[in-house]
């Protein structure tokens, strides 16, 4: 049997590579988080009574951690297979540089709470990035919608022509959907914003550690209270975040599907600029909407990531189980995919050309049937009688100017009653949360890493 020496004992080589799995590559994304988490932990250890580290030792460790962060920024910090993961790679490096001092840093900590805090630190950055990108797309949809708010468009149900609608109503519907998704992202952010550090293996430690302190140092809102729940929340937290991401993708997929229909020559409502479409290798004339097709496909992918994590967690007994490691890949993948889709769609929306004539040509007299029935109601006819009258006399319907029909729909949220200011304020509020949180995090991290 070929064994490999590791920080935590000799392991069969096959077992080592099987159990490390993809951590050696994926944990590269967690290096900065691991160092920051460790900085908070050692700071707390230096404040314990009796202190595990002196203040001077704590500063030494933080200086080394900053070097690791700088190396990682240049892509030069290496996690080896013998390390298994980022946590032991950082501990090995600190021990190489600081000797026995490096061996003290893991006091009162387990890799279980360490990876949990790393993932939450990683997630909070990603969630703020996602919120910023979602707000940008919502703003783009609102700008597009407002610009074309009066352009009539046939409103459909069952994909069949239904009632007069407008481009503004269509675009702002998707913007409002995204703004609701932001509410889910913010709740996921708030749940994520609790610090699991100090839960150790999931059952606490016999020394008096200060969990409030590590939580504050890292800029979290509070510690996860129960140490066992802190451990169990690994995986659940990822699943909550991915479920918010998959709601975002549900919105994006519907935007994509609409755009595919409305840019078909048979509709011709919208045109996509050439540079955002792709050609065919055989059909010279083709300008395919591959971007939006892939957004639709990736909605399935993000849902698959969410389900992968959910399914992995649902069968787990209480306490840490190594299965959780396998939630990392779909977690990172699901977030990255959602963010890429948000980013690709914003310029797309801004560049859509609106073909007013094609939109107008879509209006056949029957699209005004419901409006006509309600007109008769206005003249005193009970609705059901008016409905039957119009149904039996569809040929009497006139082709009216859809803009005139739209102009009458001014009540709250109707095609001409969209409160653009209210929707824009929701975008501003999301951006406000992002910048406030980013400032608070930057402030906490800067203070934590200062070694003056
Ligand atoms: N790479 C591991 C994970 O992602 C780190 C925690 C390992 N803990 C353990 N008890 N083996 O879960």
Image (cartoon, rainbow, N blue to C red):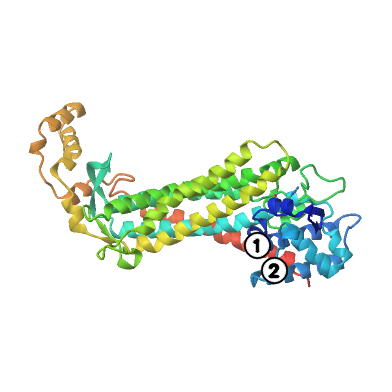
For the point 67% across and 71% down, the residue is 76
Mark 1 lies within 8 Å of ligand 1 (Cβ measured): no
> For the residue carrying disc 2, how many other residues have a C-alpha within 10 Å: few (<14), some (14-19), or many (20+)?
some
Q: Residue furthest front?
A: 1
* x then y, percent, for residue 224: 70, 45
Callout 2: SS: loop
For the point 89% across and 58% down, the residue is 51
* x then y, percent, for residue 404: 17, 50
Mark 1 vs mark 2: which is more N-terminal?
Answer: 1
Picture quadrant of residue 397 = top left
Q: Is residue 294 left or right of residue 114?
A: left
Residue nearer the viewer, 370 or 91: 91
| Residue carrying label 2 | 77
Picture quadrant of residue 128 = bottom right
Q: Is residue 39 visible?
A: no
Picture quadrant of residue 379 = top left
The correct choice, above or below, for 305 with respect to 268 in the image is: above
Q: Is residue 335 visible?
A: yes
Q: Is residue 275 left or right of residue 8?
A: left
* x then y, percent, for residue 309: 59, 44
| Residue carrying label 1 | 28
Marks 2 and 1: in contact by CB < 8 Å? yes
Residue nearer the viewer, 164 or 313: 313
How many labels were placed on the picture?
2
* x then y, percent, for residue 245: 51, 49
Q: Separation of disc 1 and disc 2 at Cα?
A: 8 Å
Q: Is residue 260 left or right of residue 117?
A: left
Callout 1: SS: helix
For the point 18% across and 30% down, the residue is 387
């Amino acid at each position: 049997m070929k064994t490999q020496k590791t920080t935590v004992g000799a392991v069969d080589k096959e077992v080592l590579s099987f159990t490390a799995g993809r951590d050696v590559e994926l944990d590269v994304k967690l290096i900065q988080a691991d160092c920051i988490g460790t900085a908070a932990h050692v700071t707390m250890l230096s404040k314990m009574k009796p202190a595990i580290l002196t203040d001077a030792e704590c500063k030494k460790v933080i200086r080394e951690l900053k070097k690791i962060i700088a190396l990682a920024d240049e892509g030069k910090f290496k996690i080896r297979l013998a390390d298994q993961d980022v946590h032991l790679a950082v501990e090995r490096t600190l021990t190489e540089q600081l000797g026995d001092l490096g061996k003290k840093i893991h006091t009162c900590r387990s890799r279980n709470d360490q990876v949990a805090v790393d993932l939450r630190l990683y997630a909070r950055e990603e969630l703020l990035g996602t919120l910023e990108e979602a707000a940008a797309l919502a703003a783009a949809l609102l700008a597009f919608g407002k610009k074309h708010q009066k352009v009539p468009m046939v409103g459909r149900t069952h994909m069949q022509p239904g009632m007069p609608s407008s481009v503004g109503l269509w675009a702002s519907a998707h913007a409002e959907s995204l703004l609701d998704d932001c509410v889910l992202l913010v709740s996921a952010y708030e749940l994520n914003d609790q610090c699991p550090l100090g839960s150790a293996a999931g059952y606490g430690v016999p020394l008096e550690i200060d969990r409030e302190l590590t939580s504050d140092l890292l800029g979290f809102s509070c510690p996860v209270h129960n140490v066992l729940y802190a451990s169990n929340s690994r995986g659940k937290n990822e699943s909550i975040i991915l479920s918010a991401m998959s709601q975002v993708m549900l919105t994006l997929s519907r935007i994509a599907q609409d755009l595919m229909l409305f840019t078909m020559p048979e509709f011709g409502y919208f045109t996509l600029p050439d540079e955002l479409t792709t050609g065919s290798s055989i059909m010279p004339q083709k300008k395919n909407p591959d971007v939006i097709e892939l957004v639709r496909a990736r909605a399935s992918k993000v849902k698959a990531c969410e389900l992968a994590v959910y399914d992995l967690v649902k069968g787990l007994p209480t306490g840490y189980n190594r299965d959780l490691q396998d939630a990392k890949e779909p977690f990172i993948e699901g977030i990255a995919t959602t963010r890429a889709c948000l980013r690709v769609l914003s310029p797309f929306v801004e560049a859509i050309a609106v073909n007013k004539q094609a939109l107008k040509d879509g209006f056949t007299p029957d699209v005004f049937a419901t409006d006509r029935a309600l007109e008769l109601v206005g003249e005193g006819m009970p609705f059901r009688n008016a409905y039957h009258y119009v149904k039996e006399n569809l040929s009497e319907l006139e082709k009216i100017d859809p803009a005139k029909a739209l102009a009458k729909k001014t009540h709250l949220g109707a095609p001409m009653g969209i409160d653009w200011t209210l929707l824009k304020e929701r975008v501003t509020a999301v951006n406000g949360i992002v910048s406030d949180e980013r400032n608070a995090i930057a402030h906490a991290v800067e203070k934590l890493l200062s070694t003056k």
